[in-house]
Amino acid sequence: MPLQIDVSRVLGWSTALALHVLALMLLLIPAAYVAAPLPRERMQIRMLLPPEPTPPVPVPIKPDVPTLVQPRTVPKPQVAPLPPPTASADDALAVAPLPASEPQAPVLAPSVPGPAAGGAGAQLQYRSAPPPAYPIAALRNHEQGTVLLRVRVEADGR
């Protein structure tokens, strides 16, 4: 049996569907038109940079002129002249004394760089020194940090 299309039924359903779509669209449109607010005028910010620092004036470096140490003159001990010998019979057999000659300076070995004059075998054990004890108050406050020490060792080891 062939199906017959009822025109009144199709028109009823179509009208109901169209009214519902129209009602839904009216709900989506706001009741009053609200204009979008104008954007505020942007505030202009000027960045003021501090003036560039002037380069430091180069200080002329004076070369260190090592001070020359005047060598000490050690006075030579003067040998007192011997009294003139008196001739006697016993002295005839005696052997004449050798003339006094100046003693020769001892030969020094070439200098080898070694430990400082602070003492024989003195060594600077700065890197292997034990760490200092922390103050009790710092330990209780859980304070931590790094300490930088500057150690100045003079030529005599102090």
Image (cartoon, rainbow, N blue to C red):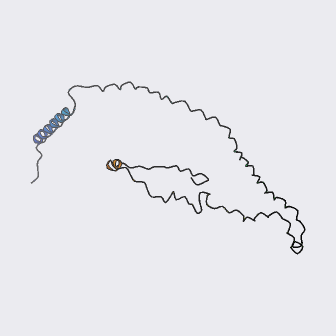
In the displayed structure image, the side of residue 9 where residue 119 appears, left or right: right
How many discs appear?
0
Where residue 109 appears, x then y in whole percent?
Answer: 72, 65
Residue at 45% over, 58% down: 130
- The quadrant of the image that shows the N terminus is bottom left
In the displayed structure, 22 sits above or below 117; it is above
Q: Nearer the viewer, residue 92 or 60?
A: 92
Residue 83 as seen in the image, left or right of residue 111: right
Quarter of the image holding residue 102? bottom right
Q: Residue at x 19, y 32 (%)?
A: 26
Residue for point 54% across, 58% down: 124
- The residue lying toward the viewer, choosing from 5 and 105, is 105
Q: Is residue 148 above or below residue 52?
A: below
Residue 145 x %, y %: 41, 49
User: Would residue 116 be found to the left or right of residue 109 on screen?
Assistant: left
Please name the residue shown 78% across and 54% down the image: 75
Q: Is residue 61 above or below residue 73?
A: above
Residue 118 locus on image (x, y percent): 59, 57
Tell me which corner region of the image, top left, top right, bottom left or bottom right, holds residue 105. bottom right
Picture coordinates of residue 49 (x, y %)?
51, 30
Nearer to us in this view, 66 or 5: 66
In this view, the residue farthest toward the left is: 1
Can you name the residue that lies furthest to the bottom here? 93
- Looking at this view, is 88 or 104 the one in front? 88
